[in-house]
Amino acid sequence: MLVLCYPRCTTCQKAKKWLDDNKIKYEDRDIAKENPNQKELKEWHKKSGLPLKKFFNTSGLKYKELGLKDKLPNMTEAEMYKLLASDGMLVKRPLLIKDDLVLLGFKEEEWKALKKK
């Protein structure tokens, strides 16, 4: 299981604490130092079944700075993948990947499914 986080993100800290408290093993990856590439993003997007726009960190400074709220609706998927791969701070986090499961953000109810596997 892979968890992409930003160390200073309080939501990421909560998610990792939850995983640790529940004795769930994971590989931790700093999303700012090693951002996902386009191939990974495409694979995770397909597995998630979510719209690609959900992969954007809409509360992030970079998102607002680039005015993406207005630009995203007119972008192609290829352009969105390229943009997401250009800067890990644009990607919603934490991002958890396990086999065929992809979770965006930390919602404890969703993450409880990990304890059953």
Image: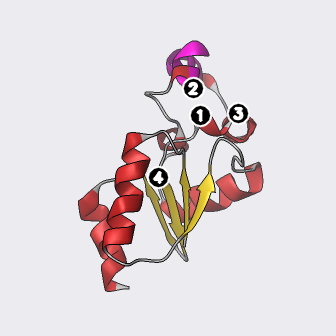
Tag in front: 2 or 3: 3
The residues colored magenta run 62-71
- Residue, disc 1: 90
Q: Give above or below for 48 relative to 113.
A: above
Residue 52 in view, yes or no: yes
The CA distance from mark 2 to mark 4 is 15 Å
- Give the mark nearest the N terminus, 1 or 3: 3
The kind of secondary structure element at disc 2 is helix
Q: Amino acid at mark 1?
A: Leu
Left or right for 89, reference 103: right
Label 1 neighbour load within 10 Å: few <14, some 14-19, many 20+: many
Which element is circle 3 on? helix
Real-space CA distance between mark 1 and mark 3, rounded to the nearest whole angstrom:
8 Å
Residue 88: x %, y % from top left: 65, 40
Considering every residue shown, the one lying at the far bottom of the view is 117
Q: Are marks 2 and 1 in contact (CB under 8 Å)?
A: no
* Quadrant of the frame with the C terminus: bottom left
Say whether disc 4 or disc 1 marks the residue closer to the N-terminus. Answer: 4
**Callout 1–callout 3 Cβ contact below 8 Å:** yes
Residue lying at 66% horizontally and 61% vertically, measured from the top left: 43
Mark 4, residue position: 50
Q: Amino acid at mark 2?
A: Leu
